[in-house]
Image (cartoon, rainbow, N blue to C red):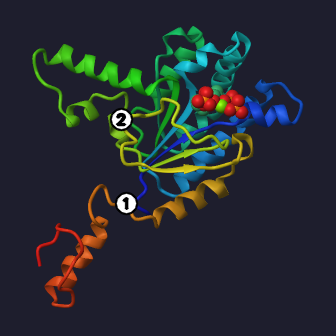
Amino acid sequence: MSNIKHVAVIMDGNGRWAKRRFRPRVWGHVRGSSVVSDIVKAADDVGLKSLTLYAFSTENWSRPAEEVSTLFTILKKFLLKEKAKILANNIKFKVIGQIQNLPQATVSLIRDVEALTENATGLYLTFAFSYGGRAEILSSINHFIEKNPGQQITEKDLSAALYRPESGDVDLLIRTGGEQRISNFLLWQIAYAELYFSPTKWPDFTATEFKKIIDDVSIRERRFGNVCSQVGLEEATRQAASGKTTYLQGNTLNV
Ligand code: IPE
Ligand code: IPE
Ligand code: MG
C-alpha cells in the first residue's frame, strides 16, 4: 500500500470528447458517467481510504439549463444503478456541495444512499456536486463561529469543520481533459497534494491509467516543506546514529 490515501479527481473533458465525435456535449457526460464505477472499483482495489470526485461545480450552474438538468438526471441514474454495488462493497457514500436546488427526488435519493451507508467501514466515496472550494471554506468558518462565538479559528478547527473531514487532506489530485487548473476544487484540502494532469478526456479514462498514476506518484518524494521526506529523514537519522553519515544537508538534523 502506498502513501497515497486520498485521491481527488476533476473529471473533465466530456464536452470536448463529444464535440470531437460530432455529438452533443451531454452525450459526453453520459459516456463519462459510465467510467465512474470503474474508477471507484479501482480505488477500492488499490486500498485507498478516500476518493473524491468532482462532478458539478458551483460555477457549472451557469451552463445551459438543458445541460445542467441532464447532469442531474445522470447523477440520479448513476445512484439508482450503483446503489446495490455501493452497499455490497461497504462503501461510505456522501455528496458534498449545495444540493438543495437539485430536483427533490434526486436529493432524497442522495440522502437515502448516504443514510444506508452511514455505518460502512470501507472506502469514503464523495461526490462533489454543486460544490465550490471557496464556499466550503466560508461555510466551515461560519459554522465554527456560530458554535464558538468570539473564538479564533485554527487550522485544525477548520479542517474539522469541512463538509467531510474524515476524508482528510488530499494526497493526489488528478485532473483529466488536459487543462491545468484547480477550478475551485477542495482548495483547503489540496495544500500539499501531488498534482497530476492527464491529457485523457474523462470518457476515455480507465482504471489502468488511474492505477498507473497512483503508482507513478507514489514514488515522488513529498517533502512537506522539509529538506527531505519523512522516510528520508528517518533513514538519515538511523545512518547518523550508526556513524555512517556525519552530514545531512539543511538544518533539520543535528548530528
Ligand atoms: C466535465 O466535462 C464535466 C462537468 C464539468 C460537469 P466538461 O463538460 O467540462 O467537458 P469539457 O471541459 O467542456 O470538455
Ligand atoms: C471543473 O471543470 C468542474 C468539474 C469537472 C465538475 P470545468 O470544465 O467546469 O472547469 P473550467 O471551466 O474548465 O475551469
Ligand atoms: Mg471542462
Q: Is residue 198 above or below residue 70?
A: below
143 left or right of 214 in image: left
Q: Which residue is mark 1?
A: 222
- Horizontal and vertical percent position of residue 88: 55, 42
Q: Nearer the viewer, residue 69 or 135?
A: 135
Q: Is residue 14 above or below residue 225?
A: above
- For image coordinates 56% across by 9% down, the residue present is 104
Dot 2: few (<14), some (14–19), or many (≥20) neighbours within 10 Å? some
Q: Nearer the viewer, residue 90 or 219?
A: 219
Dot 1 surroundings within 10 Å: few (below 14), some, or many (20 or more)? some
Q: Is residue 1 visible?
A: no
Residue 76 visible in the current orientation = yes
Mark 2 vs 1, N-terminal side: 2
Mark linked to residue 188: 2
Residue 107, horizontal then vertical, whole percent = 53, 15
Name the kind of residue labelled 2 in the image.
Trp
